[in-house]
Image (cartoon, grey):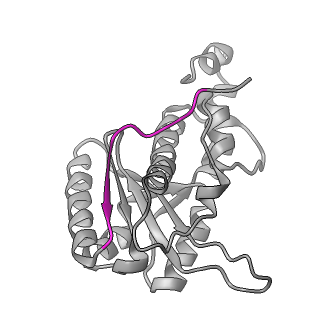
Amino acid sequence: MRYPEMTFKGRITYSRTEIEVERAAMELLKIIEAKKNEVSLPAIGFDIEWRASFRKGAPPGKAAVMQICADTSHCHVMHIFHSGIPKSLRLLLENSMLLKVGIGIGNDAVKVFKDYNVSVKAVEDLSYLANQKLGRDSQKWSLASLTENLISKQLPKPKKIRLGNWEAKVLSKDQLHYAATDAFASWYLYEVLRSLPDVEKVATDKTSEEVTDGSPK
C-alpha cells in the first residue's frame, strides 16, 4: 500500500548570508518565547544536511544546511556553509530550555560541534521517544519509517536531492522543500508522540485497547 506523501505546505524562509541567518534566528527566538506561555519546554524540529563524499576514505563535507521548524506554518532553512553560525543562532542552539527534536539528532549535534564549535543543547531523539511511547524495545527508526508507522504517510527521500550538493551557492527549490519537510516532519511527529500516553500506563489500564485505538491517524 502506498501512503499519501507528507509534505510541508507552509512558508519557507531561506537564509544564506550572516545577516539573513541572524535575522531568521531572532525571529525564531521571538516565536519560541511566545510558545513558553503554552508549554514549559517548547520544541523545534531540527535537522542538518551536508555534502556526501563519494571518494573512498574521504571525510564527509562540513554541515552545510540547518533546517528548523517550530509549527505548521513556517520553516527556516539556513545555509550555514556560507553564513556560519551567528550570535542569535548560537543562542538558540545552546538554549537548554528549548528542545531540539529529530531522528539521530545526537549525531547531528556532534557534527555541528565538530564543524562549528557550537553546542546543540537539549536534544531528544525521536527514535527513543517512539520506542517509549509505542512499547518497542530498541527499534531503530528512520524519519521515513516513523512517519509511515505513526501517521500513515510517506516521506519522500529522493536520492538525487538527499545526496546532492548542499554546498551550492544557492539551493534549489527542491532542496529547500526537502530540507523544510524533514524539519517539519520531526516537529510534527514529536507533537504526535508527546500526545500519546506512556505505554506502561496503557498496559495497566483496563481500557487499553480503546486507548491505543484512539491514537492519531
- Note whether residue 200 is visible: no
Magenta region, residue range: 4-16
Q: Is residue 128 visible?
A: yes
Is residue 152 left or right of 93 when viewed as pictured?
A: right
Q: Is residue 19 above or below residue 212?
A: below
How far across and down, in percent of the image, does residue 191 sit? 46, 39
Q: Is residue 60 above or below residue 97?
A: below
Residue at the (74%, 23%) spot, across then down: 1
The main secondary structure of the magenta stretch is loop
Residue for point 56% across, 77% down: 111
Q: Residue 97 in the image: state x and y as whole percent.
A: 35, 61
Q: Nearer the viewer, residue 86 or 17?
A: 17
Residue 91 placement: quadrant:
bottom left
Image height check: is 33 above or below 37? Answer: below
Q: Is residue 10 left or right of residue 184?
A: left
Q: Looking at the picture, does residue 33 appear above or below residue 21? A: above
Magenta stretch: residue 198 in it? Answer: no
Q: Nearer the viewer, residue 19 or 30?
A: 19
